[in-house]
């Protein structure tokens, strides 16, 4: 088979705040694999990175060197996906490009009820960091759009301001009306984390993602044992590629949830391993996109559609960019579906 790649820059409709700074643009690379007989048929997969978070991205030059090597030896890499264990974003791009090609180059990654338009997936509405007024405006908009589960980024502004916003939500909406998730992206220090979690527990928070920085397994284990707010591991899973390592992490920390992002957590292959392990240990999970364009989001959503998982998934990022790629995905009433 023949393959090639190309880079694309996406621009945010409005600056999006995270604990790692404000994002205004986003880079992706698209792998294209061509049919050996009919080169007009091609599969496309997105390699999406978040600088400072993606374990396989250090700079443009080295990243594109790996992409060039993969595309020049595409059959070798497809026959041994383990070669890309340290490059999850490239692995996911390659896996989904191949599946797309295999299914006729029609953006069909997995044939299931979701991709056939017979199943809708509940998703959370994403609330980006900002000042108090901005946060409340975003929340009002998401509620008007029909979301019943919101995910709020915290950790970049004053914690008391964020508590005030959360309190204002709970004064207006009960836990039966709105399920509220928060994502700290590791912003809490170990010595303050439990007190902040206890304060958050006053507002019936569904879960908190990654309260402290990664690679503090014993501290995280103690937090999971003591917290009144269920903890979901996210960044903690990045870079853990071997099955025994994954098992050790889950057995040590015993988190209440894990969150899976294929471009960060080992592509389709790696996420399937996480799912099998977590389900064997009765640890619930949900899947989340990681700022991919509609190409990657389509692949993640179809992958999520392979499972019977009633938890709202994190797939509401299709409207982030001014120059996003046309999509057959639609969001309505807090659910995503194919048309």
Image (spheres, rainbow, N blue to C red):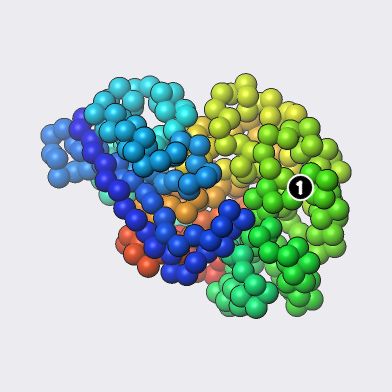
Depth order, front residue of 323/283: 323
Depth order, front residue of 104/53: 53
Is residue 223 visible in the rendered image? The answer is yes
Residue 246 drawn at (x, y percent): 63, 28
Q: Quadrant of the C terminus?
A: bottom left
Up-down relation of residue 101 to residue 302 (above or below): above
Up-down relation of residue 172 to residue 204 (above or below): below
Tell me which corner region of the image, top left, top right, bottom left or bottom right, holds residue 62. Answer: top left
Q: Is residue 260 left or right of residue 227?
A: left
Is residue 329 visible in the rendered image? The answer is no
Residue at the location (66% across, 26% down)? 247
Residue 112 drawn at (x, y percent): 43, 46
Residue at the location (74% across, 33% down)? 217
Q: Is residue 190 left or right of residue 9?
A: right
Tell me which corner region of the image, top left, top right, bottom left or bottom right, holds residue 128. Answer: bottom right
Residue 33 drawn at (x, y percent): 25, 38
Up-down relation of residue 300 to residue 319 (above or below): above
Q: Quadrant of the N terminus?
A: top left
Query: How busy is the neighbourhood of tag 1: few (under 14 within 10 Å), some, or many (20 plus)?
Result: few
The number of callouts visible is 1
Depth order, front residue of 311/271: 271
Q: Which residue is mark 1?
A: 189
Depth order, front residue of 179/140: 140
Q: Is residue 44 left or right of residue 80?
A: left
Residue 178 drawn at (x, y percent): 70, 67
Residue at the location (82% across, 55% down)? 196
Q: Secondary structure at mark 1?
A: loop
Tell me which corner region of the image, top left, top right, bottom left or bottom right, holds residue 59. Answer: top left
Residue at the location (76% across, 47% down)? 189
């Amino acid at each position: 088979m023949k393959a090639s790649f190309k880079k694309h820059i996406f621009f945010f409709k409005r600056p999006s705040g995270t604990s790692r700074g404000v994002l205004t643009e986003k880079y992706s690379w698209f792998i294209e694999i061509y049919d050996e007989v009919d080169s007009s048929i091609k599969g496309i997969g997105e390699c999406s990175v978040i600088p400072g978070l993606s374990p396989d991205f250090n700079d443009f030059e080295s990243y594109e060197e790996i992409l060039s090597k993969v595309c020049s030896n595409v059959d070798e890499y497809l026959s041994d996906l383990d070669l890309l264990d340290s490059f999850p974003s490239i692995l996911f791009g390659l896996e989904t490009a191949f599946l797309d090609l295999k299914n006729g180059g029609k953006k069909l990654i997995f044939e299931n009820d979701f991709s056939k338009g017979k199943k809708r997936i509940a998703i959370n509405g994403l609330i980006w960091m900002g000042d108090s007024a901005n946060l409340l405006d975003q929340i009002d908009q998401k509620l008007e759009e029909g979301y019943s589960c919101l995910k709020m980024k915290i950790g970049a502004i004053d914690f008391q301001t964020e508590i005030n916003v959360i309190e204002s939500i709970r004064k207006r909406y009960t836990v039966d009306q709105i399920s509220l998730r928060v994502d700290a992206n590791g912003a809490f220090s170990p010595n303050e984390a439990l007190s902040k979690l206890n304060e958050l527990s006053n507002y019936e928070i569904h879960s908190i993602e990654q309260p402290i920085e990664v690679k503090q397994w014993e501290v995280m284990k103690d937090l999971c044992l003591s917290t009144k707010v269920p903890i979901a591991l996210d960044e903690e899973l990045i870079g853990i590629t071997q099955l025994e390592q994954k098992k050790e992490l889950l057995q040590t920390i015993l988190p209440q949830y894990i969150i899976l992002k294929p471009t960060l957590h080992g592509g389709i292959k790696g996420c399937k391993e996480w799912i099998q392990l977590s389900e064997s240990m009765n640890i619930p999970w949900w899947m989340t996109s990681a700022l991919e364009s509609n190409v990657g989001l389509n692949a993640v959503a179809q992958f999520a559609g392979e499972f019977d998982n009633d938890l709202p998934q994190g797939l509401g990022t299709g409207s982030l960019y001014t120059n996003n790629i046309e999509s057959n995905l639609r969001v309505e009433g807090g659910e995503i579906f194919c048309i």
